[in-house]
Amino acid sequence: MDMRQLRYFLAIAHEGQITRAAKQLNMEQPPLSRQLKLIEQELGVVLFDRNGKRLQLTQAGEMLRDRALVLMKQFEDTITYVQELGEGVQGVLSIGAVVSCVSLLPPVLRKFTEKYPQVTFKIQEGDHFLLGELLENRDLEFIVTRLPFQSDFQSQHYSVLPLPSDPFVALLPSEWCPPGQRAMTMEELAGFPFLTLKTDRTTGMHLQVFHEFKRFGLEPRIVSECSSVAIAISLVAAGIGAAVLPNSVMRSFAPPSIAKVAIADAHFHSEIGVVWLRDRHLSKSARHLMEMLVEQI
């Protein structure tokens, strides 16, 4: 079996019909049917259950599809690598970022596009689990994220480039904070109703903040668990509660109804990093952008 036949098989698996797959591949239906038969004969297995016009993958077919997708991505990476040996930095760069890290990108991307105007971007925003899946499927080259990175995949799949850490700050409704106040203690902060960033699957930042409260023997009253930074910020602005979030978040979310103050007696930080698949070749544009992230953040 060669890469051409793998492409044929993946097209049939995706479309579920020989006719539609042939159209996608710009070929006639009979030759594609013959190729599928040759693949099954070579492997000695049935890849599809044929129920009328619809083709359903068998267990063997599902395994081949999953492995073939990885092989095709690796093949495409190899082609990109070879082409880049004789070309400058160009093409489309697909990257991801968790919501709380999005504000770190604009100044770096501006400098990057000035230096490498032939590169365009696809930027995906999401939580660790969505971005981890996109990374695993090789739809993204790397992601900028809070550490540790939590996903459905094993951590040894990833390489991690740490970036400068991001200090936590307290965010309060402006009317709760006296004019000119620039800092408060953990004890003062624990006296306010509290908003925390937490979902059923992402708890890293929540645990880090509440570990710090616990270190001071404090337990703030949680009035809401928020699934995103945007929700937490909007609730602070509405006067629902206070929150502790990384300082860089306020580059994107800075309504005048929110006061940002330092935490005087606790010096803890959110760790940030670039994460990518350990076995993936990164394009020139990805490597140069990563270098700029280290320099600029």
Image (cartoon, rainbow, N blue to C red):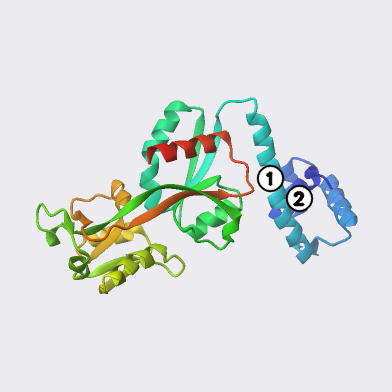
Residue 151: give x, y in percent of width and height: 53, 61
| Frontmost residue, 287 versus 103 | 287
Q: Is mark 1 on a helix, strand or loop?
A: helix
| Amino acid type, residue under disc 2 in the picture | Thr
Residue, x 38% and y 41% (percent of image)? 297
Q: Residue 234 is drawn in which quadrant?
A: bottom left
In the depicted structure, whether residue 187 falls above or below residue 110:
below
Residue, x 45% and y 27% (percent of image)? 115
Confirm or deny contact between disc 1 and disc 2 (CB under 8 A): no
Task: Return the mark for residue 122.
Answer: none
Residue 208: give x, y in percent of width and height: 37, 64
| Frontmost residue, 206 versus 44 | 206
Residue, x 89% and y 54% (percent of image)? 42
Q: Circle 1: is it few (<14), some (14-19), or many (20+) Cα within 10 Å?
A: some
> Label 1, on which residue?
74
Residue, x 44% and y 30% (percent of image)? 113
If you read the primary sequence from the N terminus, does the residue marked by circle 1 or circle 2 appear first?
2
Compared across the picture, whether 207 is left or right of 37 comes to left
| Amino acid type, residue under disc 1 in the picture | Gln
Q: What element carries label 2?
A: helix
> Label 2, on which residue?
19
Residue 128: give x, y in percent of width and height: 48, 58
